[in-house]
Image (cartoon, rainbow, N blue to C red):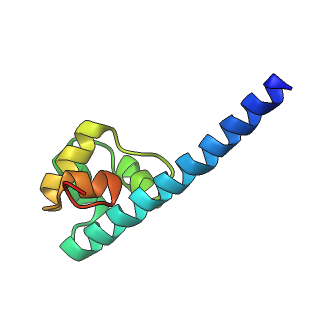
Amino acid sequence: MNRHLQNIGHLERSVEDDRLRRALAARLDRAFKRAGIRSARAAKRLGVREDDVQYWRSGITVPPLNACMRLATVLQLDVHWLCTGQPQGA
């Protein structure tokens, strides 16, 4: 029974992680479009592969925190909002 509860907990976290990853991807994609910056240009400025940026924008992967901080600078965004969807201090 305990093993069953552990599996359910893992699945619930996976669903929540997926939801959060997709929300971050949506914020990133909107910010890129608003700023008129393409994935290739951002990748060059961040020192990562273009594929990495495209994966972040589509929600396949999540950028590491240091990349989020640099993305926020490049896209002129609040890093807290970018990572959480909430305004600073909320």
Q: Is residue 26 left or right of residue 68?
A: right
* Quarter occupied by residue 35: bottom left
Q: Give the residue drawn at x 26%, y 50%.
A: 43
- Residue 41 in the image: state x and y as whole percent: 21, 58
Quarter of the figure that contains the C terminus: bottom left
Q: Is residue 44 left or right of residue 64?
A: left
Seen from the viewer's position, the closer of residues 39 and 33 is 33
Q: Give the residue drawn at x 60%, y 41%.
A: 13
The correct choice, above or below, for 7 with respect to 61 in the image is above
Q: Give the residue drawn at x 47%, y 46%.
A: 61
- Residue 9 in the image: state x and y as whole percent: 68, 36
- Residue 88 in the image: state x and y as whole percent: 19, 56
- Residue 49 in the image: state x and y as whole percent: 33, 45
Quarter of the figure that contains the N terminus: top right
* Quarter occupied by residue 5: top right
Q: Is residue 5 left or right of residue 40?
A: right
Q: Residue at the far right: name it.
A: 1
